Image: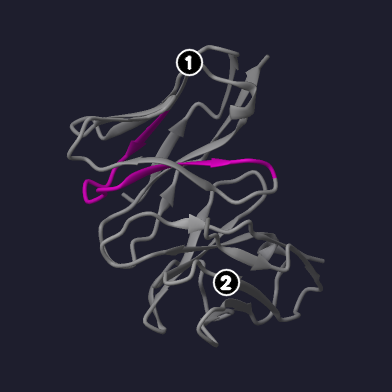
């Protein structure tokens, strides 16, 4: 069964450093998402991406964040200058097309900012 | 108006019992209501979902009940098993192409053997 994959599974970085989280969405899916989950809290939407541009972003997704689809398979989330409060699980999700609803999530990357 | 409220925060059920988790939403533009199951250290996994044109959807031991007028929906797990022990999130979205999911706070379900 096709699945969303994410790397790395755990990333530790120092405050102020840049991090790139990588995702490979399900093949042939057209819509891509990043969500985050701070430990013990609910999952929060960050950004959606379609046709090589951002469709929607939340108030969390400020200028420190950016997304990119550098090739036909990868989808990345970059945090330019990490803060302690960026520590969370980051989930990538994808859905097949405009007429579908189902979003499928990857296993997540645990980001720890020290 | 984007909130989805979920209860209870935690739930303990005996094996074979019925687990019931409730959610309420505010935004009447929401038209897709999925439930996700999450095990520790894993990503949310889509369990079952409903659109507001039906009041109930059943898949195996899992049933969603939907009350459009009350803006509430619930997940029922029949014959609960220890393997069902996980965190369950309800969510909602509008049918737009980008369609972000708005999640509830989550319910930690423990099914005792």
Q: Which residue is mark 1?
A: B18
Residue at image point 28% right, 55% down = B94
Which image quadrant is residue B55 in? top left
Q: Nearer the viewer, mark 2 or mark 1?
A: 2
Q: Nearer the viewer, residue A64 or A32?
A: A32
Residue A42 image point, x, y percent: 54, 47
Which image quadrant is residue B80 in? top right
Q: Secondary structure at mark 1?
A: loop
Quarter of the image containing the C terminus of chain B? top right
Q: Secondary structure at mark 2?
A: strand
In the rendered view, does B60 fall on the left or right side of B69?
right
Residue B68 image point, x, y percent: 21, 34
Q: Residue furthest front?
A: A1
Q: Chain of mark 2?
A: A
Residue A28 image point, x, y percent: 42, 72
The number of numbered discs placed on residues in the rendered structure image is 2
Q: Which residue is mark 2?
A: A24
Residue at image point 40% right, 54% down = B101
Residue at image point 49% right, 66% down = A26
Q: In the displayed structure, would residue B34 be above or below residue B71?
A: below
Q: In the displayed structure, would residue A31 be above or below residue B6?
A: below
The CA distance from mark 2 to mark 1 is 37 Å
Q: Chain of mark 1?
A: B
In the rendered view, does A63 fall on the left or right side of A32?
right
Q: What are the residue bounds of the magenta stretch?
A: B22-40
């Amino acid at each position: 069964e096709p699945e969303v994959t994410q790397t790395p599974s755990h990333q530790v970085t120092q405050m102020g450093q840049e991090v790139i989280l990588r995702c490979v969405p399900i093949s042939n899916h057209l819509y891509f998402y990043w969500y985050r989950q701070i430990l013990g809290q609910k999952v929060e939407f960050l950004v959606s991406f379609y046709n090589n541009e951002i469709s929607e972003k939340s108030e969390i997704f400020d200028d420190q964040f950016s997304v990119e689809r550098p090739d036909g398979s990868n989808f990345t989330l970059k945090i330019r200058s990490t803060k302690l409060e960026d520590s969370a699980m980051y989930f990538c999700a994808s859905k097949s097309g405009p007429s579908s609803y189902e979003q499928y999530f990857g296993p997540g990357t645990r980001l720890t900012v020290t | 108006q984007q909130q989805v409220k979920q209860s209870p925060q935690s739930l303990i059920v005996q094996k074979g019992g019925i687990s019931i988790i409730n959610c309420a939403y505010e935004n009447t533009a929401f038209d897709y209501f999925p439930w996700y199951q999450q095990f520790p250290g894993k990503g949310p996994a889509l369990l079952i979902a409903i659109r507001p044109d039906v009041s109930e959807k059943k898949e195996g031991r899992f049933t969603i009940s939907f009350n459009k007028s009350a803006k509430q929906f619930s997940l029922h797990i029949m014959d609960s098993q220890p393997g069902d022990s996980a965190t369950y999130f309800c969510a909602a979205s509008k049918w737009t192409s980008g369609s972000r999911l708005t999640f509830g706070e989550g319910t930690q379900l423990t099914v005792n053997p």
